[in-house]
Image (cartoon, rainbow, N blue to C red):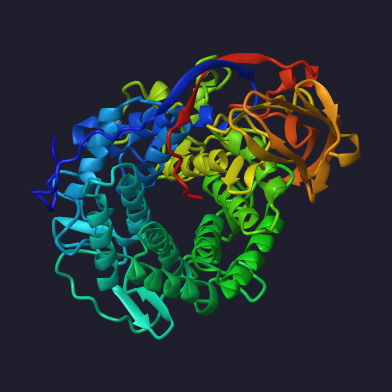
């Protein structure tokens, strides 16, 4: 069924092309962002509804008697999928469901109105609006017409337009991006050196009126989602209007809105709904602010971001990257607090951005990626069919009126296989899903998928000074291939493919005194620059080995108000006690043998990498 789009004459798009080389290789069966990317592409394309022009099913309830996916107003978070998909194809080379990608691209152009904004059609989509105003969904008023605009998601869409413009410079994407910037500008209130959206939603023909009071709480934070896209548009195209609005929005959020305290602490989102502090809504602002610092070098904004980052780290468990969905939950019960994969993804992205800005947070990113982040991706569904879960435990819906049961606007068609690669919405410290709630909300899948690319991109950085290996993870590139044996053993192999200068960062848990460096099986002595080993000039065909001891250690921690004993090898959790119930995490006994397991893989090296983080 073709939706009633606002533009019946949008440019027709072609299936995108991702050029690069493929080759088979045996690599260690260890943490591999490119493999995560390929799995995620399954989720980003298969959880869409072909009967409604590939619209997202926002919720996946895998614990119901019959696993189900269904539509809600929150389907508009598909904008996150739209941005992440071309990035993950660049990292993995996956060609799965290329026509679905083209259909999604076409739909977003068809949704662009004459004013440049992106309008979601309502006709024939009874799930398109809730029964009442819902600020969580970005609705400040109930639209009266046949289309509405989620201004919050405009930033992600704008970023996607920029990415496709880099992939297809002759396509309609740069023009679409500039039109969207003008649309955002038309609904923005500018006051001196600050700016903010007049509301978080809009509909065609609605008058833009300056509100009596500036937005506060979550309504203020929503500006950061838009600002990030604006700043990305400046970074890619040099659009000065986009930078001006994005910078002023960021300044308002971080300096004037009251969303953050003077020491970076997170303040309440919706005082009228209880003292509620949503972690992800705040960490998204850290990412946006760092995007601005990367683009402009604004040291004042860097100071705000650093304070907020350090505050955020203290609210979670930095040993494994468990960050709570909420900091305060009055009226939401006093039981264990779940994580939210969006939060973990934001924190990894922020750690990577800070590291690139000269504030070394590589170890933060490494710990969080290998543990809570990696374990939150759905890589198999046998746990749902092996009879250990009692379906009778799901007699009560996790959130009445939202999850559970048999939704009216959903599907039960091949749900398990279609959700492979998705990310848990509410993981526990030891379980893919906390308690008996719904399993997946795809805003987390969209957020985490983009962070997979951020990780893949920044395992290495290439510049005129040479190649830096920042994270000891599997990675193929035109300059070198990295095979990481961690955590089986403390060993990393680097196969050089171009004459180049090489630096390799060793993680914080490694004592530099006990590092051995080999070039073509010959032991050499190297100097260190901070945590980086300086190999100097290396040549095409050279094999580099970096060797160091790896040991197991245990830590006693309190997570979700429960005591856990966690066993590590390096930064990687290899066991957690007590174990989970539904889908236990950290089933990693194979790592503890100390003998590397190998896998045969088709590696992909793109002709052109997209600088996005």
Say which residue appears at 75% left-offset and 22% top-offset: 520
Say which residue appears at 28% left-offset and 57% top-offset: 177
* Observer-nearest of 306 and 295: 295
Say which residue appears at 61% left-offset and 40% top-offset: 459
Locate residue 56 relative to residue 480 in the image: left or right: left
Q: Is residue 425 visible?
A: no
Which quadrant of the view contains residue 127? top left
Image location (x, y in percent) of residue 515: 85, 34
Q: Considering only vertical position in the picture, is 343 above or below 411?
A: below
Image location (x, y in percent) of residue 55: 27, 39
Image location (x, y in percent) of residue 391: 49, 24
Locate residue 422 relative to residue 376 in the image: left or right: left
Q: Is residue 153 visible?
A: yes
* Observer-nearest of 38 and 426: 38
Question: In the rendered view of the protein, which quadrant contains the N terminus?
Answer: top left
- Give the residue furthest to the right: 513
Say which residue appears at 73% left-offset and 33% top-offset: 573
* Observer-nearest of 220 and 478: 478
Q: Considering only vertical position in the picture, is 27 above or below 294?
A: above
Image location (x, y in percent) of residue 159: 37, 53
């Amino acid at each position: 069924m073709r939706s009633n789009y606002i533009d019946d004459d949008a440019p027709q798009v072609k299936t995108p092309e991702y050029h690069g080389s493929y080759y088979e290789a045996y690599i260690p069966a260890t943490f591999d962002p490119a493999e995560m990317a390929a799995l995620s592409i399954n989720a980003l394309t298969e959880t869409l509804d072909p009967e409604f022009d590939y619209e997202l099913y926002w919720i996946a309830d895998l614990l119901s008697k019959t696993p189900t996916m269904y539509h809600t107003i929150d389907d508009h978070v598909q904008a996150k999928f739209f941005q992440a998909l071309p990035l993950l194809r660049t990292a993995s080379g996956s060609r799965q469901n290329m026509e679905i990608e083209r259909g999604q691209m076409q739909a977003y152009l068809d949704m662009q109105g004459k004013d440049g904004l992106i309008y979601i059609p309502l006709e024939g989509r009874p799930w398109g609006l809730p029964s009442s105003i819902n600020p969580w969904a970005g609705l400040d008023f109930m639209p009266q017409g046949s289309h509405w605009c989620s201004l919050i998601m405009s930033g992600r869409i704008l970023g996607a337009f920029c990415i496709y413009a880099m992939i297809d410079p002759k396509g309609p994407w740069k023009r679409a991006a500039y039109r969207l910037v003008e649309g955002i500008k038309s609904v923005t209130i500018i006051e001196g050196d600050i700016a903010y959206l007049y509301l978080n939603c809009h509909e065609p023909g609605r008058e833009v009126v300056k509100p009596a009071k500036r937005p506060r709480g979550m309504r203020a934070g929503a500006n950061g989602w838009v600002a990030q896209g604006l700043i990305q548009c400046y970074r890619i195209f040099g659009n000065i209007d986009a930078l001006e609005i994005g910078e002023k929005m960021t300044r308002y959020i971080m300096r004037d809105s009251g969303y953050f305290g003077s020491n970076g602490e997170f303040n309440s989102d919706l005082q009228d709904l209880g003292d509620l502090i949503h972690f992800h809504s705040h960490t998204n602002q850290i990412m946006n602010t760092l995007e601005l610092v990367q683009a402009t070098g604004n040291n004042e904004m860097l100071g705000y971001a650093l304070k907020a980052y350090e505050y955020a780290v203290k609210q979670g468990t930095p040993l494994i990257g468990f960050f709570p969905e909420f900091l305060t939950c009055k009226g939401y019960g006093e039981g264990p607090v779940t994580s939210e994969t969006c939060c973990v993804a934001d924190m990894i992205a922020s750690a990577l951005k800070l590291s690139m800005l000269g504030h070394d947070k590589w170890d933060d990113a490494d710990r969080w990626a290998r543990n809570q982040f990696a374990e939150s991706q759905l890589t198999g569904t046998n746990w749902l069919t092996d009879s250990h879960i009692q379906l009778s435990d799901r007699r009560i819906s996790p959130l009445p009126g939202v999850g559970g049961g048999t939704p009216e606007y959903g599907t039960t068609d091949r749900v398990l296989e279609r959700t492979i690669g998705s990310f848990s919405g509410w993981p526990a410290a030891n379980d893919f899903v906390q308690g008996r709630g719904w399993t997946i909300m795809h805003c987390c899948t969209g957020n985490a998928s983009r962070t997979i690319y951020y990780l893949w991109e920044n395992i290495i950085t290439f510049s005129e000074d040479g190649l830096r290996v920042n994270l000891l993870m599997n990675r193929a590139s035109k300059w070198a291939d990295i095979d990481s044996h961690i955590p089986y053993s403390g060993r990393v192999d680097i196969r050089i493919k171009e004459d180049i200068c090489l630096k390799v960062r060793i993680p914080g848990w490694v004592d530099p005194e006990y590092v051995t460096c080999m070039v073509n099986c010959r032991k050499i002595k190297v100097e260190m620059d901070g945590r980086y080993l300086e190999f100097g000039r290396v040549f095409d065909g050279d094999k580099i080995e970096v060797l160091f001891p790896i040991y197991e250690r245990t830590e006693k921690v309190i997570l979700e108000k429960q005591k856990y004993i966690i066993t590590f090898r390096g930064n990687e959790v290899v066991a957690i006690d007590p174990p989970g119930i539904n889908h236990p995490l950290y089933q990693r006994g194979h790592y503890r043998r100390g003998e590397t397991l190998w896998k045969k893989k088709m590696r992909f090296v793109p002709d052109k990498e997209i600088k996005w983080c």
